[in-house]
Amino acid sequence: MLSFFRDTRATLRALSKARDNMIAAWPKSFYRREFIEENILGRRLYIINSPAGVQRVFVTNAANYRKSPSNTATLKPLLGNGLFVSEGELWSRQRKVMTPATGANRLAPYAEIIGACGREMLGEWQERGTTFECDVNEPFTLVTAEVISQIMFGYRLGAQGWTLYEAFKDYQASAGRVHIAEMLGFPTWMPRPGRLAGKRAVEKFDGVLADIIRAGRERAEPATPDLLHMLVAYRDAEGKAMPPDLVRDEVASIFLAGHETTAITLAWAFYLLDQHRDVEARVHAELEKVLGGREPRFEDIDQLVYCRAVIDETLRLFPPVHVFSRQAIGPDEVCGHQIRKGSFMTVSSWVLHRHELWWEKPNKFRPERFLPENAAKVNRFAYIPFGTGPRVCLGKHLGLLEATMLFAMIAQRFQLRVKPGTSVEPLGRMTLRPRWGMPMVITRRA
């Protein structure tokens, strides 16, 4: 094993680096290796960089692996016992309750809401003049939060979107880092930095969630029940309703998964478009051919194949969820390696998506990889922006629809360029965000 974790001092340095920016802690050699075994202060850690290993841990023997303590400790203060934290019977039940809200039969009406929210954002941009500057993380987060709120909860956020934006930004800054204690599975009662600030952020977040849930309970059930009504109307075999705290946790979970990742993807997509003007020209050509100047609709999405490929390739290079961690419940064998009970299994989608064995010129931005004629060349266990297996993201198809549709709407009407002098650095903490934001110069297209 290389000297990355050769002694305790080197180990602590590496863990400290990972705490600041997880993706910066991966050695270059990891992008060429399939399986790495480490012993960190007496704790066994396996880093899986092969599709076969991903399939074993996350799919074929997923029952043997639970969410790692580091994942749980980072998310639980914000999400409680929601879908992204819960395990076992609770997770299975909640997944079944929530799945109908993301079914394929609902995507067409959801597209109408996406279009309406996108139009509202672009109308505000139009009023700002021919050219203006802004950190696009802000409007992208606000519009995706509005979309998910209206789709899943039947609630218009309006100005409360800013409250959610600030609360989540504060939470990421204070509690979004993985602490060394979590990495090593130390008890939860041990002090962690940032807990007080994180608690204040959650309280601000909860104020908005309470308004959403209260409004949902008070309004009449829509003809097609939204997710909030499904949660409120649920009754178990004994006729008991879902506890209010769990309703809150699931609403929080959907907000986190349903807006943050899509907003980040849009920011990275337009960053990449600025860096690759040939791709931008091809995007505009497709938009003109398919839409002819009109706004995209649901039935257009299947024809916007290059726009969708840009989103897919953006998710490869900048996966919002950049690391997945599990802990072995019992012994196993993965890629010929004996796995002990209690061992930690880590898959970094950042590393896997840029791995030299699975991708040709892995660091190059090539949307063509994801065009229909090349689909068979992509190993589905080497590309996991939404995870894989039983815990694959529930809103995957909605997220792809939303990202593609908003991307097309924005690119059709505006040109986005990174503000000169801006340092763009990917920061891997709870999600993969640009460390200093994404300030851009936005110009209305003729």
Image (cartoon, helix red, strand yellow):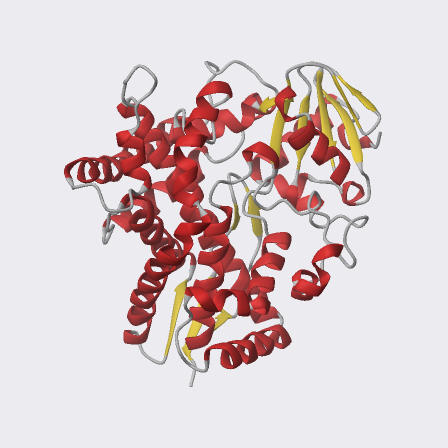
Looking at the image, residue 121 sits to the left or right of residue 441; the answer is left
Percent position of residue 278, x then y? 64, 76
Please indicate, yes or no, whether residue 203 appears anywhere in the rendered image.
yes
* Picture layout, residue 54 above or below residue 326: below
Q: Nearer the viewer, residue 271 or 247?
A: 247
Please indicate, yes or no, whether residue 422 appears anywhere in the rendered image.
no
* Picture layout, residue 399 above or below residue 330: below
Looking at the image, residue 237 sits to the left or right of residue 407; the answer is left
Residue at 76%, 28% in the rendered image: 5
Residue at 46%, 82% in the rendered image: 292
Percent position of residue 178, x then y? 54, 31
| Quadrant including the N terminus | top right
Looking at the image, residue 14 sits to the left or right of residue 396; the answer is right
Looking at the image, residue 86 sits to the left or right of residue 317; the answer is left
* Picture layout, residue 401 above or below residue 24: below
| Quadrant including the C terminus | bottom left
Percent position of residue 148, x then y? 35, 49
Residue at 54%, 62% in the rendered image: 269
Q: Quadrant of residue 79?
A: top left
Percent position of residue 414, x then y? 43, 75
Q: Quadrant of residue 441?
A: bottom left
For this orientation, the residue located farthest to the bottom is: 446
Q: How many marks?
A: 0
Residue at 68%, 25% in the rendered image: 61
Q: Nearer the viewer, residue 360 or 97?
A: 97
Q: Nearer the viewer, residue 91 or 146?
A: 91
